[in-house]
């Protein structure tokens, strides 16, 4: 069992960039990439997939509501309900994890995502 | 021509429906969209679609198992796997089990239309 390397992390940066470019025609800019070991930056909606291969851990995709609503608008999805916003973060987490199998190989296991909505004080 | 959409993501099922409605493909009637393999097999036996788009990672019954069942029931059915699992081994397994084509997520509208057009032409 080992930590992901910098090169490994690049795979996820490429996957997330590729997702937004493919769907919205706009490249997603990635800030500082790092491996979170304790605290995770959580936005309004989060999709999480437990992954295992030579590594064991979890892949999180967390996004603010406004970003997800924009994504659904681009996808011409009129129903921007809580259920569909959760569906979107789950689908993105699933896609990023699935795309990672091209690099990590078929031992990269990723079951269906768990999705959550973070309630915040305004 | 009848099409059934199988994907555990509601927004993906809706997106495929919209792309079909907007496309210039030969007339395709969407006979239903379902979120898992069990429901897919039930709908398939009722509606007898000639075309299916099939996700792989789904609860209850996954896409490979469902593809095997559908092809056993009707060997003439054309099944397009639409999945984020982008390693070669997964694609080969799906094709061995009777799928006719493979489209990686994320996909553009044009990629989906072209992939289905290829299957219709066969």
Image (spheres, coloured by chain):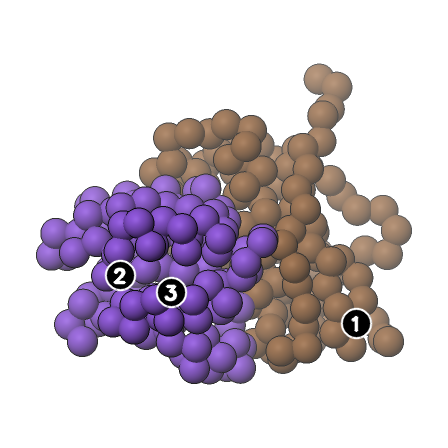
Callouts 3 and 2 in the same chain: yes
Residue drawn at (85%, 46%) of the image: A39
Which chain hosts label 3? B
Q: Which mark is residue B70?
A: 3
Total number of numbered discs in the rendering: 3
Q: Which residue is mark 2?
A: B51
Q: Is A105 on the left-hand or right-hand side of B76?
A: right
What kind of element bears circle 1? loop
Q: Chain of mark 2?
A: B
| Image marks 1 and 2: residues in contact by CB distance under 8 Å | no
Closest to the observer, A19 or B118: B118
The answer to whether residue A13 is visible is no
On the image, the x and y values in percent for residue B21 come to: 21, 45
Q: Residues within 10 Å of mark 2 (few under 14, many from 20)?
A: many
Badge 1 crowding class, 10 Å Cα cut-off, few under 14, some 14 to 19, many 20 or more, is few
* Quadrant (top left, top right, bottom left, bottom right) of the N terminus of chain A: bottom right
Q: CA distance from mark 3 to mark 1?
A: 35 Å
Res A121 quadrant in image: top right
Q: CA distance from mark 3 to mark 2?
A: 11 Å
Q: Residues within 10 Å of mark 3 (few under 14, many from 20)?
A: many
Is residue B48 visible in the rendered structure shown here? yes
**Closer to viewer: mark 3 or mark 1:** 3
Tell me the element at label 3.
helix
Query: What x and y, as percent, mark residue B36?
Result: 49, 51
Foreground residue among A61 and B86? B86
Which residue has dot 1 on it? Answer: A55
Which quarter of the rendering shows the C terminus of chain A?
Answer: top right
Q: Are marks 3 and 1 on the same chain?
A: no
């Amino acid at each position: 069992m080992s930590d992901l390397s910098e090169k490994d992390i690049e795979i996820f940066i490429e996957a997330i960039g590729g997702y937004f470019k493919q769907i919205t025609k706009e490249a997603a800019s990635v800030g500082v990439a790092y491996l979170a070991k304790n605290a995770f930056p959580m936005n309004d909606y989060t999709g999480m997939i437990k992954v295992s291969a030579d590594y064991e851990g979890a892949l999180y995709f967390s996004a603010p509501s406004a970003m997800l609503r924009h994504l659904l608008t681009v996808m011409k999805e009129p129903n921007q309900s809580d259920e569909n916003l959760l569906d979107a973060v789950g689908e993105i987490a699933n896609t990023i994890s699935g795309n990672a199998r091209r690099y990590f190989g078929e031992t990269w296991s990723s079951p269906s995502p768990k999705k959550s909505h973070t309630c915040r004080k305004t | 021509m009848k099409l059934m959409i199988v994907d555990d993501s509601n927004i993906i099922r809706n997106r495929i429906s919209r792309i079909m409605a907007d496309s210039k493909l030969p007339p395709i009637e969407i006979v239903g969209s379902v979120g898992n393999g069990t429901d897919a097999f039930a709908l398939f036996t009722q509606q007898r679609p000639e075309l299916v788009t099939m996700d792989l990672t789904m609860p209850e019954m996954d896409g490979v198992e469902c593809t095997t069942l559908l092809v056993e029931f009707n060997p003439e059915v054309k099944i397009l796997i639409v999945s984020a699992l982008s390693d070669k081994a997964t694609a080969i397994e799906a094709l061995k089990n009777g799928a006719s084509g493979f489209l990686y997520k994320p996909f553009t509208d044009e990629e989906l239309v072209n992939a289905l057009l290829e299957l219709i032409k066969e």
